[in-house]
Image: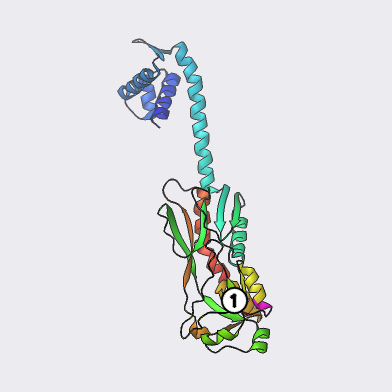
Amino acid sequence: MDSLSGLNVFVRVAETGSFVAAGGVLGVSASAIGKSISRLESRLNVRLFHRSTRSLTLTAEGSLFLERSRRILAEFEAAEQEISLAAQFPQGRLRISLPMVGSLMQPVLSEFMRHYPQVELELNFTDKMVDVIEEGFDAVIRTGEMTDSRLSLRKLGDYTKYVVASPQYLAERGTPQNPAELAHHLCLHYRFSRSGKIEPWPLTGALPAHLPLSMVCNNLEAQVYFTQQGCGISCLPEFAVRDGLTSGKLQKILPDYVSHNAAFNILWPSGGYMTPRLRVFIDFLCEHTFAHSRS
């Protein structure tokens, strides 16, 4: 920035032909203008002006440098205008990593795309743990506790879980009245891709030693589908089963025995400059993700 300031002083002196006149344009003293030109000449190791008591004219080197300086300042001004425009109208590409929860994220993402058509989204759906910085993501959306000190975090919202089954399954197999009775039912489970572990069911009260592993999958939407088809009982996030409960394809069971509360968070690299496109993306998701899912 000091170099750009020096270039600006040099161009104003060349255009006005006077330290005093250039100082009037820039709002500084003639002495300050003279010192700035002297520092610039020392750094370049050339004389830019022929000085006399009556005139101030460019040297051959000064004339060449003036042409370049004008181009540099014009480019900088264009860059400022471009950035200012981008701040008003966010644009450019965002690379985002999201969990495999399309039923929650897809509606709000499509709404964001309609609001900000100049922002290009590159979406990577995976439940694997990604390194936001090393893998070049602008942001990631995840559940659970986050411990990476290199990342900033905002909460998108909270969610709970329901134990659900289809009316068809309950008519055929009966409705369990407490968690212990799940030992005699078909239970459908979710396996975390990143750890390989089976997600535990957040049940209270007397529990069976082991829940039957009638099916295990690593895709939430597939688990919802099989549950709706009467293949067994599942413990699923509320946002994943809301449509099924509303349509009657699913029913809640054991509501007094489920104890669960978790959060969805959006994380991005800490420090540095946040681009306007990332800022509006974070703000939009924080405002709309769970509000959208409840509508």
Dot 1: what SS? loop
Region rendered in magenta:
227-232
Where is residue 185? Give x, y as percent.
Answer: 60, 84
Q: Nearer the viewer, residue 251 or 214?
A: 214
Residue at 30%, 22% (x, y): give it: 31
Give the answer, above or below, for where 3 lies relative to 205.
above
Magenta: main secondary structure equals: loop
Let me know if residue 295 appears in the view: no
Residue at screen point 47% across, 73% down: 261
| Image color mode | rainbow
When the figure is inspected, residue 176 is found, relative to residue 17, above or below; the finding is: below
- On the image, which quarter does residue 58 sit in? top left
Q: Residues within 10 Å of mark 1 (few under 14, many from 20)?
A: some
Q: Quadrant of the C terminus?
A: bottom right
Residue 233: x and y, percent? 60, 80
Looking at this view, name the residue that lies furthest to the front.
209
Q: Which residue is mark 1?
A: 213
Q: Amino acid at mark 1?
A: Leu
Tell me: 28 left or right of 96. left
User: Residue 166 in magenta?
Assistant: no
